[in-house]
Amino acid sequence: MNQTHFERYLRNEKGTWREELGIVLRMSLPAILAQLTSIAMQYIDAGMVGSLGANATAAIGLVASSTWLIGGTCIGLSNGFSVQVAQLTGARRPNDARNVFRQSLSVLLLTGLFIAFMGIGISRSVPAWLGGSEEILADAGTYFFIYCCSIPFAIMRYLASGMMQSSGDMKTPGLFSALVCILDVIFNMFFIFPSRSISAGGISLMIPGAGLGVAGAALGTALAEVVISLVMLYLVCFRNEKLSLKHKGSWGWRRNTLTTAAKIAIPISFDQIFMCSAYIAATRIVANLGTVAVAANSLSITAEGLCYMPGYGIGIAATTIIGQTIGAGRKDLTRSFSRVIVLSGMAFMSLMAVVMYISAPHLFSLLTSDPGVAELSTGVLRMELVAEAFYGASICCTGVFRGAGDTLVPSLMNLFSMWGVRLVLAVFLVPGMGLYGYWLAMTIELFFRGTIFMVRLVRGRWVRKVMV
């Protein structure tokens, strides 16, 4: 079941839910596998840094919400163009799709450079703004500075990935999402730790290392972004059958393209700002609980990624599927696919939650050498896992809505859910319950968010006319 089959399916008069489920799963599988590899590499990454002690883990955890904010904004900006390409592909307008791609290259490169410049300028101040303790401020600032230097490459990788997916190529982005994580771990081995000797089978091998600690983790991630972004840009620009620059096209900026991109991207970007600023506010709340709580919170969030991996994979495929059904004028398929997508995401995330609940103690013992951090991480994560199905509903609904170009209302829903429910509850619960209070607030909020997103999905007001 490949993209050509899906394009033929769009022209069919009727289909069955089994066929649609097969299409969703086959188009989601590469993204799910990429998410799986990504999370596995994050575990290894966290384990590498965790072996340096709680302070190292806390330093990275302190600025994690800020890096998510920037990364999410970059993804939102790239979506402004990739959703247009998905709809144009479904509408069989390849020339227009190539023109949109060309415009996105120059617009997002300039945007990435601007964001990097601004981030570098405030990199040393961010950890203090987040309320970090004195012993982790220097490492946290260095990590954020190096991350900001890689932003232009990261935004181009997000663009290349989104364009490949929107034009129907789900496998290549999935493969390279995995490779960027693998490279990250390989580079970390050389940058984080000092030179060391290992013995196996009577053979001693010297492994060179820079011994840079937290800074080495940032360098490993940045260098992986540089390598993979350049390769992906080459592939989408010269090897992608539908978008290749070898075809004729226009590089000129067009008002309609930029206006449509803004309508899609600005709400997504503000959504990321609202969501991640809420995470930053939560980080400040948690930071007051001490280094162990900050480290446990960071590791628990990393571990939870294994649970929502299927949801994000299906959500990525959803944007392509819904975008192309909208572009093809098949609103009947838009509605039926949306239901299959959301139910699939909820089912997979529920299954992963059960697996994580059972394996949490062993997992955290591998991610940190601090028994207190491992015990606290296990407790708070198990509390939140009961809400994973509803979290999956919100993730998959978001992918559906983005494919239809419906981004403003979902962004406002996320804003209210995070700031009006999670953080308000956290303010009241954390003083008496510590880190457990924050994760209980998160659990309640995820139930609420999933419910309101499913209500919007069922009402169907998000099904729009073609935006391009």
Image (spheres, helix red, strand yellow):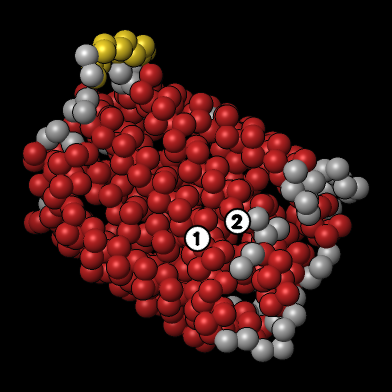
**349 to 121, vertically: above or below:** below
Residue at image coords 37%, 59% = 308
The type of residue carrying mark 1 is Leu
Tell me the crowding category of disc 1: few under 14, some 14 to 19, or many 20 or more residues within 10 angstroms, Cα based. some
Q: Which residue is mark 1?
A: 29
The disc, 2 or 1, on the residue closer to the chain's N-terminal end is 1
Q: Point out which mark residue 75 bears.
A: none
**336 to 43, vertically: above or below:** below
Question: Relative to the observer, which residue lies in front, 432 or 204?
Answer: 204
Residue at image coords 48%, 43% = 178
Tell me the crowding category of disc 2: few under 14, some 14 to 19, or many 20 or more residues within 10 angstroms, Cα based. many
Q: CA distance from mark 2 to mark 1?
A: 9 Å
Q: Is residue 226 left or right of residue 42?
A: right
Image location of residue 136, percent across then percent down: 25, 26
The furthest residue to the front: 201
Q: Which residue is mark 2?
A: 170
Q: The N terminus appears in which quarter of the rendering?
A: bottom right
Residue at image coords 45%, 38% = 181
